[in-house]
Amino acid sequence: MDNTTFLRALTILLLMACVPRGACGGDTNSVSGLLSANPLERQHASDRVLKQRADIIRELVSVIERPDTDKSCDGPLHRAIVLLGKLRAEEAVEPLADRLMFIPEGFRVEEDIPSEAYYVSAVALVQIGYPSINVMLSRIKLTQDQRERSLAGWVVSQIEGKEQASY
């Protein structure tokens, strides 16, 4: 899937979640259903919003799990990772951890000075917060790669609000 196709699909998904269904002749959308005087309709509206969120997260996770996804800066992989962080998608912690060392192509990194900001999955895991900690602690214990260990430690320290994690 190229960048344009991915962005179009994502735009359609987001619009479907936001545009009132009543505008097309159907029943009202999930968000406007929250304003209903009927408690049952409010509950159904809440359920629909959560389902839409879960569907979007599942689609974004499928993008980051594909080995052939475009890895360029602002490509589908980069965008999906950023969105999962912004959505604080706990369901995406493991797939994001698997992409911990991913740096989008086109980012310039100094060889001896790693910048955590380049590692978009690490930033997303920090945004997700505490659900990321156990997975990162496991990476610290199990990985032989010093850079990955250091990055996982950075994620933990950012979440816990400490200046340095002990690992």
Image: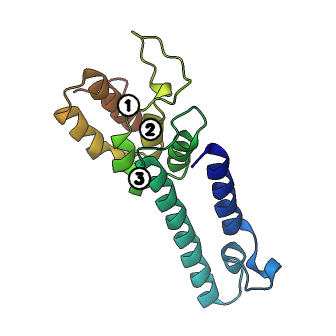
Asked which quadrant contains residue 136, the reply is top left
Mark 1, residue position: 101
Residue 33: give x, y in percent of width and height: 69, 80
Looking at numbered disc 3 in the image, what kind of residue is underneath it? Ala
Circle 2 SS class: helix
Looking at numbered disc 2 in the image, what kind of residue is underneath it? Ser
Mark 3, residue position: 92
Residue depicted at x 54% and y 23%: 107
CA gap, disc 1 and disc 3: 15 Å
**Quarter of the image that includes the C terminus:** top left
Asked which quadrant contains residue 137, the reply is top left
Q: Nearer the viewer, mark 1 or mark 3?
A: 1
Left or right of 104 in this view: 24: right
CA gap, disc 3 and disc 2: 10 Å
Q: Residues within 10 Å of mark 1 (few under 14, many from 20)?
A: some
Residue depicted at x 54% and y 61%: 56
Q: Residues within 10 Å of mark 3 (few under 14, many from 20)?
A: many
Q: Choose the circle earlier in sequence order: 3 or 2.
A: 3
Residue closest to the eye, 108 or 5:
5
Residue 14: give x, y in percent of width and height: 66, 60
Mark 2, residue position: 121
